[in-house]
């Protein structure tokens, strides 16, 4: 579904990605973990076409993405749920939910049907659909951001720190939802700073450190390894 | 090039070229005696006093970065102040002009004080409003100003030679411009200009090198307003008539355009800009109704095509003509070959440093709208050690650094540097007591040399008055300070870049320059906010080496850094924060094996 090879990228004079490769297939959940500043968000931005590559290649759905713009990637089903949720404050919950789907030109009937799916997935959003998106709690905003992504018929859903600042029960609900989506065949790339949480739900994981891949492997194997601790603390 | 010639070249007083002054003075003295049309004398007078006002704005905007779109208001204060006191109270004109200048300076100082709370766009709007208010007062307070009808019969400036009043005015206004230009040049080249440039870069940065930002901002506003007032006062006495329509916002914009078109922050910019402005005014006299349109277009073109204005254009043309020598006399081509690792040689620091001082943080807390970002944290930084402060995102590290530096006040608790209680002091006072810092996003003055950046930290050894006398005598300005700064650059292995601009150097070198500037402040305690952020491995190693050397010189260091390899290799002690609380303190090995620290970094699963 998505294959990245030897990605390198700079922000200013600073090399933020050093030779990173990854593969993600439908039905799989890949966690990208690492300490603050390790390059997780940069990797996500590079995959979404938001950060230009210095070198390396990305193929999505069998096609190279080097000449494809970020919004075209989104239309093709590579959906990025950004850090901080990015709910538009002046719009209602319902309008926030449909903004992406409307922009990519889905028909009204498809939108209505997908909206029903999201209401079933997150009933609290249906109850609050008429209020302003900014008056939702942090957890509800995160659900809305995920639902907004799902409205756009994703083939790959990429999430940047969805657990940030949320209560444990909400985190568990969101993680369970994501795991369920992966089990139904969606490809999910999960960027998380809370390594233990991500490893609990993901199939495989990539550990970044100073912009490079420090280690990778099956999530269950990484879960209790001393090497993982070392990659954070030494 | 041997070190000695390098040092000699760098330490040379910048040759303050007296030739332009001499030529200007010769023409100036001769002009009224040459068979020229009286109109040209009038134009020259106008040029003199307009250039005075523009010079003030250039110092304000070009050096200190404070925007004023209300200079016409201060110009009006000077004009009315001098016209009214000479006309209605019968004061001698030199005295009335002095009064006009004072009134304008007080007005400017007040705006400077109020402007302390506003920056950027809001500051510009504030000054625009002040300009409008003064303009309206001039129009409507008819009993005093005569409104649009104006005040006529304002005495001329003839110093007792009524038949030669045009010549006298010419000499007095011209001499004033020469004095103002000398003062501006002095400000540009001395510590005054450096401190103003630091304020332009960032006020927190300026305060952290010990500059009293409030005082300096009020002072530069007052000085720029005084010069606008002097221009206005001359204007009032030139034609003997002052009408309120002369001081509209259009004048403020014209002064601003002359400043920008001439070249912001350059020495000759105000003169060139005023010439260009006057040329435009002459050309568009016939098509007056398009005046603002033409002003606007010229401003746009200059901003887009020539950001350094006419002065910048001329100096780059001169540069090309001379064959590619860079600003400070170094061949630009040599740059690449000289960019060897900078820290290869690290001798002893040139002066006594440190003094084995501890930093004691006792139970400090800080809340933002109910959220406790830092909760009862105590950290003891022992004398002469390198102490690391780490923690996951949002742990409160930056808040603590900002409380130590004085940017935020702690809600509770105390901070002591040695025996000194810092808790209630502002940023500049803490800096002056021996607390120096570097910034996460690198703070240097962009437009001046590496040496000048280090000089910013070196303590001033002479009074400004003595410096001015030295400057007037063409002597070496801040000679001792420059030697000290150069010696610090040698310690950092950066001496060969002393006369380069920081922007010409790689990021790692610039981080070292910032560190050199902090060391020039002779700190007892050094705060390093992410010292190796954005560096490559080699540069990071160089920084680690330098930091260890500084510890040997008795400087106590507290650093925040995300790169664990670096933290674990240089720190003697590490304190770990999580969610605003101190969760551990110990040696690197202890920290690496502390279960609480591991959990803070790796988190816990949801299913537990």
Image: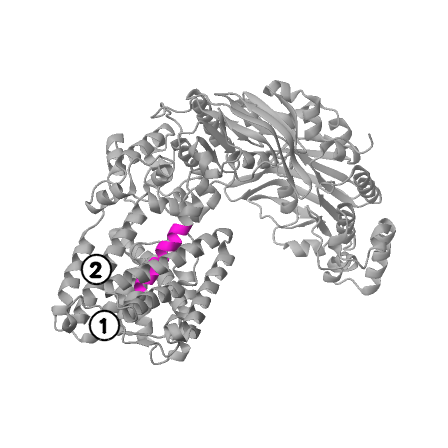
Residue B296 placement (x, y as % from top left) = 43, 69
Residue B470 placement (x, y as % from top left) = 22, 42
Residue B456: give its label. Answer: none
Dot 2 falls on a residue whose secondary structure is: helix
Q: Residues within 10 Å of mark 1 (few under 14, many from 20)?
A: some
> Is B516 left, or right, of B482 in this rendering?
right
| Residue assigned mark 1 | B42
Q: Nearer the viewer, residue B503 or B232?
A: B232
Examine the rendering and report whether any part of residue B530 can be seen. Answer: no
Examine the rendering and report whether any part of residue B535 can be seen. Answer: yes
| Residue assigned mark 2 | B175
Q: Nearer the viewer, residue A109 or B584?
A: B584
Residue at the image point whose x is 45% and y is 28% from the top: B542
Residue B464 placement (x, y as % from top left) = 29, 42
| Structure colour scheme | one colour
Residue at the image point whose x is 37% and y is 67% from the top: B76
* Depicted A149 relative to depicted A169: above or below: below
Q: In terms of secondary structure, what is the magenta stretch mainly? A: helix
Q: Residues within 10 Å of mark 2 (few under 14, many from 20)?
A: some
Report the Cα–Cα distance between label 1 and label 2.
15 Å
- Magenta region: which residues? B218-231
Residue A139 placement: quadrant: top right
> Is B551 left, or right, of A111 in this rendering?
left
Instruction: Kindly indicate whether the residues beneath marks 1 and 2 are on one polypeptide chain.
Output: yes
Q: Earlier in the sequence, mark 1 or mark 2?
A: 1
Residue B476 placement: quadrant: top left
């Amino acid at each position: 579904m998505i294959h990245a090879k030897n990605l390198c990228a700079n922000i200013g004079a600073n090399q933020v990605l050093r030779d990173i490769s990854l593969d993600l297939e439908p039905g799989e959940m890949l966690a990208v973990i690492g300490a603050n500043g390790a390059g997780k968000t940069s990797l996500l931005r590079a995959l979404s076409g938001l950060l230009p590559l210095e070198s390396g290649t990305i193929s999505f759905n069998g096609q190279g993405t080097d000449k494809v713009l970020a919004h075209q990637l989104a239309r093709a089903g590579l959906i990025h749920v950004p850090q901080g949720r990015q709910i538009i404050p002046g719009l209602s919950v319902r309008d926030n939910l449909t903004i992406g789907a409307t922009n990519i030109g889905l028909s009204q009937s498809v939108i209505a049907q997908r909206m029903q799916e999201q209401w079933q997935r997150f009933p609290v959003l249906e109850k609050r659909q008429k209020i302003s998106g900014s008056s939702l709690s942090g957890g509800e905003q995160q659900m809305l951001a995920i639902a907004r992504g799902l409205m756009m018929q994703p083939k790959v859903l990429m999430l940047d720190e969805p657990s940030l600042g949320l209560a444990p029960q909400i985190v568990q609900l969101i993680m369970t939802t994501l795991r369920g989506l992966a089990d139904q065949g969606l490809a999910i790339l999960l960027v998380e700073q809370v390594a233990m949480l991500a490893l609990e739900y993901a199939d495989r994981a990539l550990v970044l450190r100073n912009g490079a891949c420090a280690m990778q492997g099956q999530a269950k194997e990484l879960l209790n390894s001393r090497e993982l601790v070392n990659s954070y603390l030494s | 090039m041997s070190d000695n010639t390098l040092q000699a070249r760098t330490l040379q007083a910048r040759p303050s070229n007296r030739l332009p002054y001499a030529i200007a003075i010769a023409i100036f003295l001769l002009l009224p005696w040459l068979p020229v049309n009286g109109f040209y004398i009038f134009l020259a007078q106008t040029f003199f006093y307009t250039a005075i006002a523009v010079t003030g704005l250039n110092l304000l905007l070009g050096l200190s970065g404070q925007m004023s779109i209300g200079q016409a208001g201060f110009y009006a204060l000077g004009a009315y102040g001098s016209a009214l006191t000479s006309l209605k109270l019968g004061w001698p004109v030199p005295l009335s002009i002095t009064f006009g200048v004072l009134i304008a300076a007080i007005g400017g100082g007040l705006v400077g004080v109020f402007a302390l709370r506003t920056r950027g766009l809001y500051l510009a709007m504030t000054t625009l409003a002040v300009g409008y208010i003064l303009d309206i007062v001039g129009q409507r307070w008819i009993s005093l100003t005569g409104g649009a009808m104006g005040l006529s019969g304002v005495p001329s400036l003839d110093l007792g030679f009524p038949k030669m009043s045009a010549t006298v005015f010419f000499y007095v206004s011209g001499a004033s411009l020469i004095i103002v230009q000398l003062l501006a040049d002095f400000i540009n080249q001395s510590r005054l200009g450096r401190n103003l440039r630091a304020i332009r870069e960032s006020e927190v940065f300026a305060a952290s090198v010990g500059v009293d930002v409030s005082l300096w901002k009020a002072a530069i506003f007052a000085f720029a307003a005084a010069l606008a007032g002097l221009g206005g006062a001359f204007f009032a006495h030139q034609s003997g008539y002052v009408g309120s329509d002369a001081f509209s916002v259009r004048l403020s914009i014209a002064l601003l355009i002359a400043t920008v078109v001439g070249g912001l922050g350059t020495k000759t910019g105000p003169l060139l800009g005023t010439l260009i402005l006057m040329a435009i005014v002459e050309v568009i006299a016939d098509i007056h109704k398009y005046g603002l349109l033409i002003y606007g277009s010229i401003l746009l073109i200059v901003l887009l095509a020539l950001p350094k204005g006419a002065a910048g254009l001329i100096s780059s043309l001169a540069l090309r003509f001379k064959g590619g020598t860079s600003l400070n006399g170094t061949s630009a081509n040599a740059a690449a070959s000289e960019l060897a690792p900078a820290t290869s040689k690290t001798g002893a620091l040139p002066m006594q440093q440190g003094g084995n001082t501890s930093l004691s943080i006792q139970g400090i807390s800080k809340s933002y709208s109910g959220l406790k970002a830092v909760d009862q944290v105590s950290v003891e930084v022992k004398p002469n050690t390198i102490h690391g402060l780490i923690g996951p995102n949002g742990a409160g590290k930056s808040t603590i650094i900002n409380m130590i530096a004085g940017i935020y006040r702690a809600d509770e608790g105390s901070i002591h540097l040695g025996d000194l209680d810092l808790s209630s002091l502002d940023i500049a006072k803490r800096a002056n007591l021996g607390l120096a810092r570097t910034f996460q996003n690198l703070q240097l003055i962009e437009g001046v040399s590496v040496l000048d950046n280090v000089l910013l930290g070196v303590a001033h050894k002479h009074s400004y008055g003595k410096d001015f006398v030295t400057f007037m005598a063409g002597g070496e300005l801040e000679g001792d300070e420059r030697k000290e700064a150069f010696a610090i650059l040698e310690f950092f292995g950066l001496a060969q870049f002393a006369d380069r601009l920081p922007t010409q150097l790689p990021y790692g070198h610039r981080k070292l320059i910032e560190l050199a500037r902090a060391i020039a402040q002779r700190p007892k305690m050094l705060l390093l906010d992410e010292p190796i952020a954005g560096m490559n491995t080699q540069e990071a190693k160089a920084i680690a080496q330098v930091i260890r050397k500084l510890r040997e010189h008795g400087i106590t260091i507290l650093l925040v850094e995300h790169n664990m390899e670096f933290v674990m290799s240089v720190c003697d002690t590490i304190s770990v924060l999580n969610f605003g609380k101190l969760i551990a303190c110990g040696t690197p090995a202890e920290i690496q094996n502390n279960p609480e620290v591991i959990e803070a970094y790796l988190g816990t699963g949801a299913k537990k």
